[in-house]
Image (cartoon, rainbow, N blue to C red):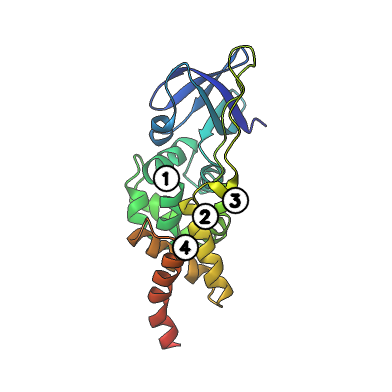
Amino acid sequence: MIGRIAGVILHRAPDHVLIDVRGVGYIVHINERTAAALPAVGEAAALYTELLVREDLLQLFGFTSLLEKEWHRLLTGVQGIGAKASLAILGTLGAEGLARAIAVGDWGAVRKSPGVGPKLAQRVVLELKDKAPAVMAMGGALSVDPGPAMIEPDTAGPAPAPAPASARPPSSAQIQSDALSALVNLGYGQSEAASAVAGAAQSEPDATAPALIRAALRALAPKSADQ
């Protein structure tokens, strides 16, 4: 299994990229969101990959984070969603946007993806709604970017040391994961907590974890009062 590709970009297009890895060129299929995030031709790049194996076909699909790759795995497990449809959905919503849409049951957001009709969008939300909280909870750990490509020592200077994890600002997925964990620790069910966190993140995309927790608690308060 090829889980990661790191090398130099030889060619790029809206739906694929050709990456040279020590003299071997790999065609990696990507979505437009990923394509926009990649550097220019001639520069180093790295992607997490999923290998699709068929009798007459081998295809690599590339992702900018483990979180995106995990959602691709779940999406392609839904009947009617192939690899290309999955890339279209992730290209439209992104991994975190997809998590929010599924957690709050917003199939209309999934419907905006090219080639995805209303019935298929509803099926995605229905089949993955129970799995969204677990992926959101792991979001911080799965949002690792693939890191820099390896550059040969004789063609470049020493690679800069990566910034320590403590020096990096928390990602949106990490913030949502922390907020979800806090709500579950307060006694809320994982599904209702995930829905509240997703809704709060949709309303306040730049919120810190404490702010997101407060917003989610406000959304959950009427439910608590009714119980």
Q: Amino acid at mark 3?
A: Ala
Q: Amino acid at mark 4?
A: Ala
Q: Residue beneath label 2, please?
A: 174
Crowding around mark 2 (Cα neighbors within 10 Å: few <14, some 14 to 19, many 20+) is many
Q: Position of residue 113 (x, y in %)?
A: 35, 43
Circles 1 and 3: CB atoms closer than 8 Å? no
14 vs 167: above or below: above
User: 159 or 67, which is in the foreground?
Assistant: 159
Q: Quadrant of the N terminus?
A: top right
Q: Residue beneath label 3, please?
A: 141
> In this orientation, does residue 53 appear?
no
Q: Secondary structure at mark 2?
A: helix
Circles 2 and 1: CB atoms closer than 8 Å? no
Q: Earlier in the sequence, mark 3 or mark 2?
A: 3
Q: Earlier in the sequence, mark 2 or mark 1?
A: 1
Position of 86 with respect to 137 (left or right) is left
Q: Earlier in the sequence, mark 4 or mark 2?
A: 2
Separation of disc 1 and disc 4 at Cα?
20 Å
Q: Residue beneath label 1, please?
A: 94
Separation of disc 4 and disc 2 at Cα?
9 Å
The disc label shown at residue 209, or none? 4
Q: Secondary structure at mark 3?
A: helix
Q: Nearer the viewer, mark 2 or mark 1?
A: 2
User: 173 or 76, which is in the foreground?
Assistant: 173
Separation of disc 3 and disc 4 at Cα?
16 Å
Q: Nearer the viewer, mark 3 or mark 4?
A: 4
Circles 3 and 4: CB atoms closer than 8 Å? no
Q: Nearer the viewer, mark 1 or mark 3?
A: 3
Q: Amino acid at mark 1?
A: Gly
Crowding around mark 1 (Cα neighbors within 10 Å: few <14, some 14 to 19, many 20+) is some
